[in-house]
Amino acid sequence: MNGILWLALDGVGHPADAPPGSVWEQDLPTLRAVVDAGPALDATLGVPGLPQSGTGQSCWLTGTDAVRLMGEHFGPVPGPTLQALLREHGLPGRLTAAGGRAALVNAYSPAYLAGGGRRNRLGCFPYAFRAAGLPLNSPDVPALGAGLGLAYASPWAETAPEEDLTRLGEELAGALGQYDLLVADLWLGDLLGHQGREGVPPEVLTAGQAYLRRVDRLLTGAVQAGARVIVSSDHGNLEDLSVKSHTLARVPFGAAGLPPRQWPTSCREAGR
C-alpha cells in the first residue's frame, strides 16, 4: 500500500475559526486529530473577497496561485483560464505522465457527465481527471457518493448507515495497493453551507453534523487499514451556518500516515 488517499472537503472552514455551536462541536476523534495536528491555511491568498471553489481547488490541484492568475476569486467551476491551467499543470495529468496511477472515486450520474453543451459544468476535480485522459466512474475503485450516505436535498435523509463509511474507508485503503493517488471530491459541505442564514436552521445544523461524522467514519476506516491520507478544504462555508455565503475562515490541511514535513502556509504551497 504505497498510494495516498486525498479527501478534498469543499466548503469546510477550520474549527478554530468556527463560531460557537458549529458543526465541529461534536465527537470527531479521527478527523479532529488529523485537522488539529496540521495548519490552518489562509484561503484568500492575500486577495480581497470571498474564496471560491474554482480558484481554490485549482490551487490545490496545480500548486499555482490561481487567484493571482485570475486576478480575483472565481468559481464554482473552472472557466477557460483555469481549464488551461488544469490541463497543463493538474496533478492527475502530471502523475499520469510520470507513469503513476490516479483515480477520482466519486460516483457521477450520467446527467452530470453529459454536461450542458459547450459550456463546462464539471468542477475542478472531474475536469482535471478528464483532462488527464482518466475515466470517471472507474469500475476499478470503490464508488463514493459525495453525500456520504446523505441525500442531496432537504431534509438530507440518510440513504445509508454511518457504519458503511468505515467499510468504504477500508476498501479505499485496499485500493491504494494499485494506485498512487485516490481522490474523493466531497462537496456536500458546501451545499449545506449555502443553506445557512441568521438564526441557524436546526435541520441544516443536524445535516452538517451528520456529514462531518460520516467524513470521520470514512477517515477512520482508511487510517485503521493503514492508508496514508491527506485532508484539505478549498474555502470556508459549513463551519458558519449563520450566513449563506462562503466565509473568510481559514481552511484545514492535515495528514495521517505520512512522515513529518515543513507545513505549508497557504493552499498554494500545499498544492505543491
Image: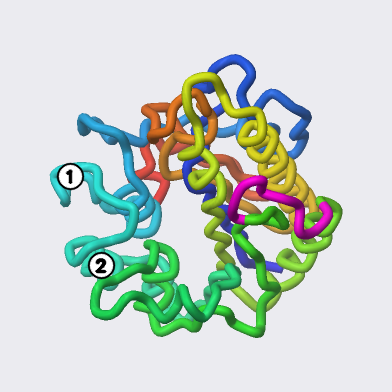
Which one is in front, 224 or 190? 190
Query: For mark 2, does the 10 Å Cα neighbourhood hold few (<14), some (14 to 19), or many (20 or more) residues?
Result: many
109 on left or right of 57: right
Helix, strand or loop at mark 1: helix
Helix, strand or loop at mark 2: helix
For the record, the magenta segment spans: 152-161
User: In the image, what residue occupies the spot 44% across and 27% down?
Assistant: 243
62 on left or right of 196: left
Disc number placed over residue 68 in the picture, else none = 1
- Image x and y of residue 78, in percent: 28, 61
User: In the image, what residue occupies the spot 32% across and 59% down?
Assistant: 77
User: In the image, what residue occupies the spot 36% across and 36% down?
Assistant: 43
Mark closer to the observer (1, 2): 2
What residue is disc 2 on?
83
- Image x and y of residue 202, in percent: 65, 28
Query: For mark 1, does the 10 Å Cα neighbourhood hold few (<14), some (14 to 19), or many (20 or more) residues?
Result: few
Which residue occupies the extreme top position in the image? 20
Disc number placed over residue 101 in the picture, else none = none
